[in-house]
Amino acid sequence: MSTQEILSKLVSFPVLGGESNLSIIQWIKDYIESFDVACTLVPNEDFTKASLHCCIGPSVDGGIILSGHTDVVPVKGQDWDTDPFTLTDKADGKLYGRGSCDMKGFLACCLNALPDLVRTDLKKPIYFAFSYDEEIGCLSTPELVQHLKNHYPETPKYAIIGEPSLLQPIIGHKGICLYTTKVNGSAGHSSRIRQEVSAIHEAARLVLWLEDKMNELVNSGNTDERFTPPHSSLHTGIIHGGIAPNVIADKAYFSWDARMIPKDNLDEIVSAFKQHCEKRIAALKPLYSDFKIETEEIHPPVIPFDSKSDSDVVKLMSEINDNQNIDTVAYASEAGQYNEAGLQSIICGPGSIEQAHRANEFIEKEQLIKYDKFLLNLIAFFSSDSIKKF
């Protein structure tokens, strides 16, 4: 099968984040094992989902993991010109379909490389590690990485996370976490604004606290010029409350996100926010005894990713990749989790992040051709004596 044919099959599995991925992961497992490569599944507790890993090459330290995820984001509400789960070739040099770019194009290239992998005398092993539920918080990756490290006697050294980057090596991204804060105040006539507790007014004060906290971080010098913006951001994207202009709102909520540069501590910021909320509760409970402020995560934290520009994995990339321009990105990925587990990690994949998560998502055929070449370069390098210096 060609890369495009494999991609067509992968796109046909409408596996969204949070849903069972057993259909696509079983197809991938069967495909890999048709080349006499043993695969290991890492299921969730109720066996409705599974990650996969396998190893090709000798049982020695210093190998590299090719990491990707099998789930995609929803298409509901988007205006697609084609069936999103049928890979469509419009003869314009692009292949359309959900996940074609993010990130089944990468998976297809990895699977297409299997014939070359199995017939090559590798000096260091190359692993596949494919996860589930990446799109809803990179949920399965820590368990997958730990299982992989426990399963094989040798220790891999590197990880390439194949998120779409136009083959540009990416050495850093911000972390992210999403929250909803609910405020419970007292309803009443708007003329009694001093006798009641408006949930909307209190929610607005909390939104401004988050903005002030963001500015405080910037003013204290907590910046990283590799990112845009070059600081951690605290942003409120949704706010709801009230029933009429002349009724004091007894309920309001707002949803917000924190995108953290690697050197900032998310727990400290959230703790400071909750401490401020406790002070507001203590101040207003005498006025209304049922006044509450409650904050909950609506998206698990995805940790920041920060790899050094002079690390061995960057040097390795310079040996196999035509694109030498390292950079950072705004989106989050599984790279931070691999990095935290002790693997020198880097993001490098086919396609552009500009096409991800949108209607009429596509990947350019040329990107697949380039990534097929990239993987051939990787295989050749891992079969040469030059790999020993890494």
Image: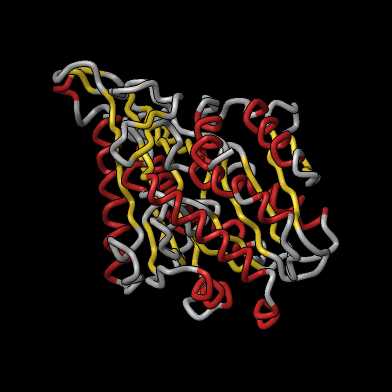
Q: Would residue 96 appear left or right of 38 to someone viewing this image?
A: left
Q: Would residue 206 appear left or right of 126 to someone viewing this image?
A: left
Which of the image's four quarters has the N terminus? Answer: top right
- Above/below status of 219 relative to 65: below
Residue that appears at 34% across and 69% down: 226
Residue that appears at 48% across and 62% down: 265
What percent of the width, then of the height, locates residue 284? 35, 37
Q: Is residue 197 visible?
A: no
Coloring scheme used: secondary structure
Residue that appears at 40% across and 51% down: 367
Please name whichever residue, 113 or 14, is drawn nearer the observer in this view of the structure: 113
Q: Would residue 141 appear left or right of 214 to someone viewing this image?
A: right
Q: Residue furthest right?
A: 153
In the picture, residue 200 is in which quadrant?
top left
Residue that appears at 33% across and 34% down: 358
**How many marks can you see?**
0
What percent of the width, then of the height, locates residue 325? 37, 71
Q: Is residue 98 visible?
A: yes
Which of the image's four quarters has the C terminus? Answer: bottom right
In the picture, residue 253 is in which quadrant?
top left
Please name whichever residue, 43 or 30, is drawn nearer the observer in this view of the structure: 30
What percent of the width, then of the height, locates residue 148? 75, 53
Please name whichever residue, 247 or 64, is drawn nearer the observer in this view of the structure: 64
